[in-house]
Structure formats: C-alpha cells, structure tokens
Image: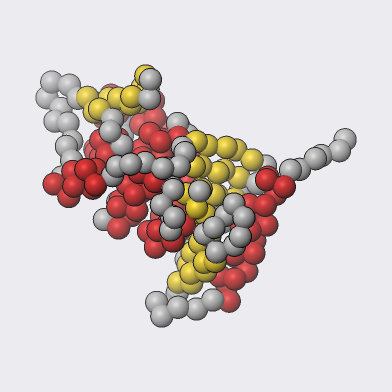
Amino acid sequence: MSITTSKRQIRPILLGLLITALVTTASVSQPGIALASSEPSGSHPSLATLQQDAAIRTLSAEEGNSLELLTQAVTRENDNLTFDYAKALSAGVDETFAADYARGILLAGGVVHGSPGVKVPTLSVSDQELRQSVRACLGRNGVENYWWGHQLRIDSCNTQLVIGLLTAGAGISALAAIITAATGAGAVAGTVAAAVLTVGAGAVTACNMYGRGVFLNHLWTGTPFCWGQ
C-alpha cells in the first residue's frame, strides 16, 4: 500500500521540527524560556514557538473530563452558542472551572443560561472592554486533523480574544471556550488550549503580525507552534 502526502500536509511538521531545533539553541534574557520566530516567504509570513524547561502543558485527566462535560452543555444553532451553566454544575464540573468557561463563551458572543438559584457568571469591566475592542474580523475559523496533529484556524477577532485572555492569565477552560466557539473543535479545543498556554501571548501576537488571525498547530509529539493567516 502506498501513501501519498501532500506538500500542504507535510510542511507544518517540517516547520515545527525546524523551529524546535532553533528554539533549543536560542537564548533570551528570561531564564528558562527560549523564543524563536522568523518570517519565511510564501503562505506563512510569521512563525513563532516557545519552549520551556518544564514539560509542555498538557491536559490533566480531570481537566479533560471537565471539558468533555462542558462541551456537552453547549448547543450551537446557526453559529449562535448557548452554554447551560447550571447543567455543567449539576454534572459535577468545578464551579470556578465552569465559570471560566462561561467567561470564554460570553467573550465569543455566546449566551450563558443558569437556573433558579444558580447565579450566571458575567463579564468583568476589563473583559467587556476587550470584547468591545474586537471588530472588523479578518481571516477564517476552522479545524483540521492531520496525521501529524491538529491545526486550528482562528480569525483576527478570536486571536485578539485569545491574546487578551493569555495576557490576563486566564486558564484552559476560558481558552477552550473561545476555540470551541470559533472552530467547533469540541474535545480538541482543550488540547489546543493547553498548547496555547505553552506558546504564550507573545508568540501568538508575533504570529498575528499581519492582523489576519493565526494557525494554531499542535503536533502529536506535543510540540505547539503557530503562524499567521
């Protein structure tokens, strides 16, 4: 049996391996962190990845189970997302984890429902300002699963939300909510959200240098990296 691999499929893993090699030899003033970025020609004008001395951030079993329950509490109709916060809590999801997910859904323009006796989370003033600052979206949203890993496309608006959350120190559930709302990635969103936490706001900002959104790539080997749309 022969296997044919397109250039489009193999290019991301080759770029990831190249950047990983560059990262291991790069140095910056902050101890324990190395950042490599470049501006290759062609369809990938900006690349960035970040590698830390610690292991690449991955989902714990508890986080994975919680995100699965949160996903089950989300409905989508004509690109309109509704998150049943009360259902998530009754399913056993930690209140803080669920509230952070609700934050992401609200930032993405979704709706959060509660029930009598269950107070629905709302956006803080700073989150409202972030939401209002996002407009004139460029780029596309979507998800692809390849033999080498996952690749998500998020447009310029969702990229700004991700950068804002990373800068504010948000956790996996808020990021996963943004990614789910943008791409419909479902369970994959948590894995990519963990990868985004590893990459960090600086690298995502570098990848979005042309303001059209980014590709978020996550190899099966665990290496996360991104480039601009």
Q: Quadrant of the rendered structure where residue 123 is?
A: top left
User: In the rendered view, would you say 93 is above or below 45?
Assistant: above
Q: Is residue 59 visible?
A: no
At x 55% / y 49%, what residue is drawn?
218
Q: Is residue 143 above or below residue 171?
A: above
Q: How is the image coloured?
A: secondary structure
Looking at the rendered image, the quarter that the N terminus falls into is: top right
Q: Position of residue 79 (x, y in %)?
A: 38, 25
Left-right relation of 223 to 170:
right
Where 115 sits versus 94, above or below?
Answer: above
Is 34 placed left or right of 101 in the picture? right
Q: Name the residue located 18 percent from the left edge and 36 percent from the top edge.
A: 121
8 vs 185, nearest the viewer: 8
| Side of 208 relative to 157 (left or right) | right
Residue 106 seen anywhere in this rendered image of the structure:
yes
Residue 184, position as x, y percentages in the image: 45, 31
- Report the residue that reaches farthest toward the right: 1
155 and 94: which one is in front?
155
- Identified at 30% across, 58% down, the residue is 167
Please count the marks in the image: 0
Q: Which image quadrant for residue 122? A: top left
Side of 112 relative to 216 (left or right): left
Image x and y of residue 147, in percent: 67, 42
For image coordinates 47% across by 49% down, the residue present is 214
On the image, the x and y values in percent for residue 70 come to: 35, 31
